[in-house]
Amino acid sequence: MMKKKVHRSELFLGRPVRVPLSLTTDPAEHKGSFGIILEADWEQDKAIVQFEGGNTGYYQFNALETLYPKKALLYSLSMVRAQKYRDEIDTFRKIVSLVIQGAELAALKLAYSNLRTEEFAVTRLDQLYEMKRDLRKYAGIKK
C-alpha cells in the first residue's frame, strides 16, 4: 500500500507546541504556554495556536517548540541510555510512552521537566519537517 503524500502544513495540524520563554517578541503574550496548532501555512511561515485557556495567537514556525518525531524520540532514548543519564531514563521512557499513546501534549509538558529531557526531545517547529523528511541526516545516524 502506498503512503499518501502529506502537504507540509498538514504535518503541523493538531500538533502540541510551546512558546519558548526566551522568545524576545511575543505579541500574543503567551511565553511558556502550551497549545495546539489549529492552522498552519508553510508558505507564510505562520501557525495559529490555540492555548489551554482558549486564546489563540499567530506565530512563525521558528518561534514555536514541539516534540521530535516518534522515530527520533526512540533514537534519543537510546542516546540517553548510552550516555548513562540514569535520572532521566525513566522520564524519557514516559515521554515516549505518552507519544505512542497519543498524549503528545502531556509528553511535551513532561519533556520540559528538566534540561536534559528537553535537550533530547524538543525541537523548533520549523526543523520538524526536515527531521521527518530525513531523520538519519538530521540526527547524524550512519547508514
Image (cartoon, helix red, strand yellow):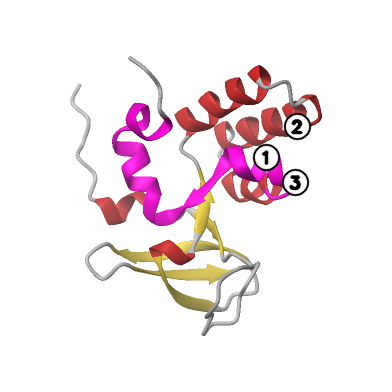
Query: CA–CA distance between discs 2 and 1?
Result: 7 Å
Label 1, residues with CA under 10 Å away: few <14, some 14-19, many ≥20:
many
Q: Position of residue 62 (x, y in %)?
A: 42, 62
- SS assignment for the magenta stretch, majority: helix
Q: Which residues are magenta?
A: 112-139
Q: Residue at x 43, y 55 (%)?
A: 125
Is disc 2 in contact with disc 1, using a CB cutoff of under 8 Å?
A: yes
Which amino acid type is shown beneath numbered disc 3?
Asn
Residue to which mark 1 is pinned:
117
Q: Residue at x 65, y 36 (%)?
A: 95
Label 2, residues with CA under 10 Å away: few <14, some 14-19, many ≥20:
some
Relative side of 78 to 86, left or right: left
Residue to which mark 3 is pinned:
114
Is disc 3 in contact with disc 2, using a CB cutoff of under 8 Å?
A: yes
Q: Position of residue 46 (x, y in %)?
A: 35, 70
> Quick check: can you spot residue 100?
yes
Query: CA–CA distance between discs 3 and 2?
Result: 8 Å
Residue to which mark 2 is pinned:
88
Is disc 1 in contact with disc 3, using a CB cutoff of under 8 Å?
A: yes
